[in-house]
Structure formats: C-alpha cells, structure tokens
Amino acid sequence: MTNKQPVHCHVVENAARQLLTERGVSIESIAKIVYDLQVKYTDSLDMKDCIDSVNAVLEKREIQHALLVGIELDKLAEQKKLSEPLQSIVEMDEGLFGVDETIAIGSVFGYGSIAVTTFGFLDKEKVGIIKELDSKEGSHVHTFLDDLVASVAANASSRLAHRIRDREEKLRQDEIDRKDEEERIG
C-alpha cells in the first residue's frame, strides 16, 4: 500500500473556487444575496462586508468538500455518466430527491441556527443566482449547485450577523479575529 499524502488545503480551496467560477457563480453574486438578507438589520452594511464573509465561508474545508462533491455530480449528470436511475433523478432534479439539500444543509450546521433557518428560506424562495441556477434552462445541471450556493450564502449571512453584533458590542478586533479563526476550523 502506498503512503498517500493529504491534498493541501490551498489546492482544495482553489479547486472549489474555480468550480464556482466555471459554473457561472461569482463571489459577488453570492454576496448580493447576503447583502439583501442583512441590509434590513443594519445601517452600516456595505458590499465589502458581504464579500469578505462569503470569502471567509469558502475557506472552510467542509464547504469546499461539499462544493467539490456536488458540482462533480452535476457535471457527471450533464455528461450522462451516472448510472440509472440516478442519472435521470439528478438530471431532472427530481422533486423528491433530497440528497442535494442534505449535503447543503450538512454544511450550514457550523454557522448555527441562523444559517440553518436562512438556508431553509433560500431553498424555498430561490433568490438571485440561486434562482438562475434552479431555472433548469439550457444543458447545465445544477441540482446540487443551487443548494450549495444557498448554503454558502446562508453561512455568510449568519457569520456576518454575528460580526455586526460583535462590532455593536464594541468587541476588540483581536476578539473578533479569534472568533473568526475558530469558525474556520472544519
């Protein structure tokens, strides 16, 4: 048996980010959803805060792994490389198929109850880029990707809500940074 080395975290993160770009999902399009979710709760929100929060979420391995798996399954379905009946189920985004939501919701637990409830809202309402991905127009399959983008947006929104509260409570920047580092584990 060969002694395999783990894939370096930067390689995994870059691959996840590249796949999002290849599939037409920009950081800004996710950040726009975060902005729309959070702007009603604070007067001081700007788009940079939202972009920073999305980028912080994308640094988490669990999120990266979920993106890699889900997008790969979507791509295999486009290429008709899945076995039946899974091929048909994924290709048509069968309404009773919940594995896509299961993977996505599994990646929101690290950001608490706000992320979980926000994911449910986004999964139901399908806003912004999530709606575009879910439209089923064209030859692309986004059965997993629309839910994964919703999970990234939900996580970034929850993370940002906590950072805003930290600022309102006038926590020192080193305290906020420490909390951020703890959240990125996993």
Image: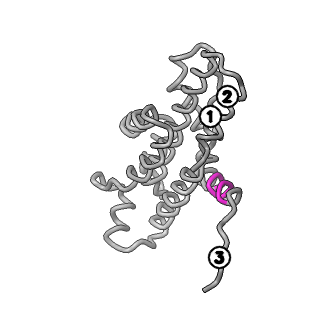
Instruction: Decide: few, some or many residues near mark 2? Use Cα within 10 Å; few <14, some 14-19, many ≥20.
Output: few
> Mark 3 against mark 2, which lies toward the viewer?
2
What amino acid type should be assigned to the residue bearing mark 1?
Answer: Lys
Task: Residue under label 3, please give it.
Answer: 4
Q: Is residue 177 above or below residue 106?
A: above
Q: Which mark is residue 69?
A: none
Q: Horizontal and vertical percent for residue 140?
A: 49, 57
Please say which color scheme the image uses: one colour
Instruction: Decide: few, some or many residues near mark 3? Use Cα within 10 Å; few <14, some 14-19, many ≥20.
Output: few
**Residue at image coords 47%, 60%:** 74
Q: Which mark is residue 175?
A: 2
**Distance of mark 1 from mark 3, alpha carbons?**
33 Å
Q: Which mark is residue 179?
A: 1
Q: Horizontal and vertical percent for residue 186?
A: 57, 50
Q: Quadrant of the N terminus?
A: bottom right
What amino acid type should be assigned to the residue bearing mark 3?
Answer: Lys
Sequence-earlier tag: 3 or 2: 3
What amino acid type should be assigned to the residue bearing mark 2?
Answer: Glu
Q: Horizontal and vertical percent for residue 104?
A: 44, 49
Q: Is residue 96 above or below residue 30?
A: below
Q: Are marks 2 and 1 in contact (CB under 8 Å)?
A: yes
- Residue 125: within the magenta? no
Magenta stretch?
A: 12-18
Q: Nearer the viewer, residue 24 or 71?
A: 71
Assign a secondary structure to mark 1.
helix
**Residue at image coords 62%, 34%:** 179
